Each structure stands twice: as structure tokens, then as C-alpha cells.
Image (cartoon, helix red, strand yellow):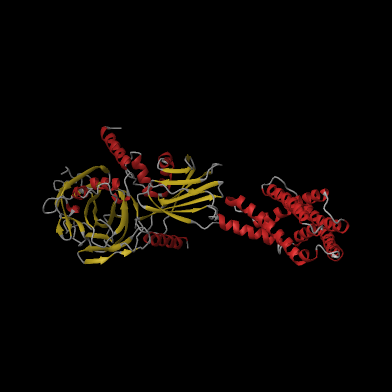
Amino acid sequence: MNASTGRHRSLFVVVAIALLSVPLAAHDMWIEPTTFFPQPGEIVSLRLRVGQDLLGDPLLLDPSLVNQFVVKDGDGIRPVVRRDGRDPAGLVRLAAPGVHVIGYRSNPSAIEIPADTFNQYLKEEGLDGVSARRASRNEARAPAREIFSRCAKSLVFSGANADAAGDRQLGFTLELVAERNPYGLRADQDLPVRLVYENRPLSGALVVAINRLNPAEKLSARTAADGRVRFKLRRDGMWLIKAVHMVPAPQGAQAEWASFWASLTFEMRTASAGTN
Amino acid sequence: MARLSRVVLASALICACGAGLLAHELGTTRVAILLNDGKTYDIEVVTDAAALVEKLAASNGEPPVADVRPERLHARLERFDEQFRRRVAVRFDASEVRPTITYAISPGADAAAAPMATIRLTGPVPSSAAHLTWRYAWTFASYAVTIRRAASDSPTTEWLEGGRSSGPVALKAPAPAVDRLATARRYLALGFTHIVPGGLDHVLFVLGIYLLSGRARSVLLQVSAFTMAHSITLGLSMYGLVTVSPRIVEPLIALSIAYVAIENIFLSELKAWRVALVFVFGLLHGMGFAGALKELGLPRSEFVTALLTFNVGVEAGQLAVIGTAFLLVGWYSADRVWYRRRIVVPASMAIACTAVYWTIQRL
């Protein structure tokens, strides 16, 4: 075993230790297509996955939870062919070449989380403002009732023209928008990503990028005032960029907090260098 | 058809989950637990094969799985057996057991679906175990566990988040809650109706011991001896300490009635040996009561209550017979000179004839 392999192995062990040890509320959710590089006209299966560090379980498509399940490309926006109660959750035929933006937005789900678990989850997701507010209200030892919504996107590239337009905004409550086409990134370029909450840039939020082949080595940054972070994505393979935002729940929600989980998946095939 | 049923099941799971207070995200994992009447357990885990292998590989410090052909997935699952066991727990009471595990890969529910792993965990249930607890920590999603105590049972379903332990599953179906007062009332009534109107042979026996003499002392001594004796054998029989076949007991009960009635014709006052004989006959009748009570069944949790109140009910039935006889004939005519000639002898003859007939019938 060479030094590089040994380091990778130790990193996977780190992942293994963390694996499956945190509560459901703190798990990511993302879209995983059968391929990120379909041929024009190919039918792509779309899986919804819940998990951690890009290790996850497929979800059955719960029709009561679906708010939007769409694909947007140069021809406009249209619904994905849903497979209610099944996995893969949807199918889409990508006729035109270019980047296709797949989006899944869920209705809110309610959950009650014990105090310790909730505090740990706030810390992991960088939700310091919520922690501070709970502490100031002497709620840090109280369980939390939360409604959470998923805002997942995936960028699929069909054809050969990598200079084509990249990501497009879908109008999700919380949304990660790649401001440069990841399929057209050169080795020396970084990927600017903007985090948008209710169509306005969200500042100070923790955004994390995880590579499937090396999930323990996470890239993370807080968004600037314009909602932007920039990542230098060194590695090939599937990437997940994610962010969580939490606000007081609206009146009548029977919960104290409402959270929004944004994710963006795509696959890099040109190895570049450097982290942010 | 199999595909359709899996789709229907998945849809049903989603509907059921959505109906809950907490809406969790439901994955493709499902678990079925079969407890074969508390003798063996058979737990079937069906889950996405590639997702499971990927997690097993990661927890073993290996990179993601690229080859997802069924035979490769199967080989990897078998190789990761020890790894798999670390996050799966089958516990009986406080003791974790080590199941026998087999792995199989099957195609997905339809052409678009991923291959599924079917993992069977089997083994014997420890003899003294009362509860099973299940934990499966190889999924991040929520999943349904269906539990059956026997293959013919309809399943109960528990929803679990990955990594959470199930509630304790009783290996035997819990007995319905029994209310003590309701049990006492029920068995009191059963004891009474076992005499009136259900037990004509016992009625005739009691009438037989009543008719011997109009004196209260005679009735009191005989009834006390009879009650004491039948209470003893009723209790001993119900606890299984005395077992005599009904084929012997029932003719003897009939014969005892005949004897008492015939003796009434020749005897007009109480003798000590009559009390002793009534006691012996009471032992026989107690075994008869026990046979009837066994047919009715006794609630295990309220065994003593049911036994005692049944016996009290029997006693009340006997006293009702004596009270009725006293009101109808004894109260007015027991002191009359013709009482014995017109009441005791003909009635005793009728009882004796009936009892002899029963004796022959029951042989």
C-alpha cells in the first residue's frame, strides 16, 4: 500500500466512524441520476437519496411530499415523469443537447427532535444564529419541533458543447445556483455558487462541497454578502454541494422552526486543482 | 404480478407513513420478522443491494463500488458478513444472539429499479425468552418492520428510523386484559347455572340429602360435608393434582345419587356414616365440577378468582335448591306424620330410579 492509498483508507475509516451515527433530521438529500452524461434522447432514471457524505439510501417517491419535480433546459421547464411510491422516483428523456437542470422540491415534513440531537445538528450545519437564539430564549435544553423541506437539484449534461449555458434558477425557496457551467470548467477555474433564499442572496450560510470518491475531505465556506461561495473542485467524480437554512416556523405550523435543505449534484470529468 | 404487488406495497407504505404525526422519508428497505410460535425466528431484510454494499465498503475503508452486477454484489455481501453484523442486532430480552445469515440478490421491481438484496437472519429462540428487540443501522431512511408471531398471523407494522431499536416484541400474543371483578361475576354465574338449571344430577343429589330428615342439623351437616369435599377435589383437579377420567367419575356420581335416594327410603335420621358417605360422594362431584370448569376455561391471570367464585356459585346453586325445596314442601309438611310416606319415600324412589337409569346410561 502506498502513502496515498493509506491516506485514502484512513479517510474512509473516518467516514465509516461518522456513518449512520446522526439522526434522520441531519441527513442530506440529493438527486442521483443513473448518468450525468446521457446521450441526447436517452431516458435517465432519477433517484432521490437520503444519507450522509454521499452514502445514502434511495427514497420511494411520496406523492404527498412532492411540490415540484421538474426538468429545466433551453426549451423551458417541464415535469419529470413521476414514479409514485417507487424507486427510481422519476424518469426524464433528455432530447436536446446541453445542461439539463433537474429539480425536486418537497412539501414540509414535521419532526420533533430531542434537544441534544437538535443542538448537534445546528452545530454541524453551521446554523449558529438558531443556536444563539435558542440559548437566549433558554430553549437550548428543550426538544425542537421542526418542519423541513428539501430543495434538491442536479445538473445533467448531454452532448459535447460544454460551453453551453449551465445551471438555471428554478425558484425554489432555498436554492444553490452554479454560476459557471461545471461541465465547462477549466483546470484553473473555480466554481462560483450562489445561495438564494426566497429569490434573494443569502449571506453567512455554510455551504459544503463533498466528492463521492473522497467524502471525508469536505470543502466548506460561508456565503458572502452577495450569497456567493467559490470552490476549487480538484477531483473528478460526483459532487454534492449543500446548504441548510433555518427560520422561525410560520404561525400555525405547529413547529418552532422551518428548515430548507438545498443540494446540487453534478459530476466532474476534468481533474482540476486546489480547494478554496 | 410480483412487480405490481411490490408497487402496491410501496404505495401503501407511503400512505401509512404519511398518515403519521411525523412524516419521515421512506426508503426502499423493508423488514419482515416471523416468530415461529416462539420456537425459531426468521427475519427478512430487503434493501437496495448497491447502496448497502457501498456503505459496507465505506465502513470497511474501501472506495465506492463501481461494479453493480448481481453476482459481484452478492460476492461482496458475503465478504462483508462480519461488517454487516456490526450494525444489526437481534436481542432476546437483554441477550444479543448471533443469527445464521444468508444473502441473495434479486432484480428490481421493474426494469428501471435497482437490484435488491434479500438478507435472511434465522435461528432458534432462547427457551426462556419473552421479548425480541430488533435494530438495523444500515439505512438512513425510515422503514417498516412487519411482525408475525406465527406464519398464519396477520402482521403488525412498526415504523422505524434507521439505527433505532424496535420496541420489545412479545414472543407470545399478550393475553387480553382481564378485569378481576368481571371475572368473579362471570364465574359466580357459571357456577350457579352449572347447578340450576344445568346440573340436574347435582340437583337430585342435593334433594336427596335434604330429604333424609326435616331437621336443619341433618341438612347442615350433610351440606357442609358435601361442600368441603367437592371444594377439595375441584381445586386439586384444576391444579392437575388429581386426574380421574370422566368415564369413571360420571357413572359414580349417578350411583351416589341413587345410593343416597335409596338410603332415604330405609333411613329416617342422620347417622355418622351417612355424613362420611356424603363427604366421599362430594369428592366425586368435585371432580365432575372440575370437568365442567375445564371445558369453560379459566383465565390464567385470574385463575384463583375464577376457581373460588365458580365454587361459590355452585354452593349458591345448591342452597337455592335446598331453599326452594324447603319453601315448597319442608316448611309446611316436614313435621307432618305423612311427610315421610307421601313426600320423602316417593320422591326418593323417583330420584333413585332416575339415578339408576343415568348410571346405566353413563357406563
Q: To which quarter of the image does residue A42 belong? A: bottom left
Q: In the rendered image, is residue B246 in sight?
A: no
**Compared to B204, does B67 lie above or below?**
above
Taking depth in this image into account, of B270 and B285 the one nearest to the observer is B270
Residue B312: x and y in percent read: 66, 55
Left or right: B142 as drawn, with respect to B345: left
Residue A35: x and y in percent read: 29, 54
**Compared to B63, does A1 lie above or below?**
above
Taking depth in this image into account, of A45 and A119 the one nearest to the observer is A119
Taking depth in this image into account, of B18 and B304 the one nearest to the observer is B304
Give the residue displayed 47% in from the left and 40% down from the top. Answer: B94
Taking depth in this image into account, of A155 and A127 the one nearest to the observer is A127
Q: Quadrant of the C terminus of chain B?
A: bottom right
Residue B156: x and y in percent read: 48, 56
Total numbered circles: 0
Q: In the rendered image, is residue B260 in sight?
A: yes
Q: To which quarter of the image does residue A91 belong? A: bottom left
- The residue furthest left is A225
- The residue furthest right is B266
Residue B164: x and y in percent read: 39, 47
Left or right: B131 as drawn, with respect to B239: left
Left or right: A210 as drawn, with respect to A229: right
Left or right: A240 as drawn, with respect to B250: left
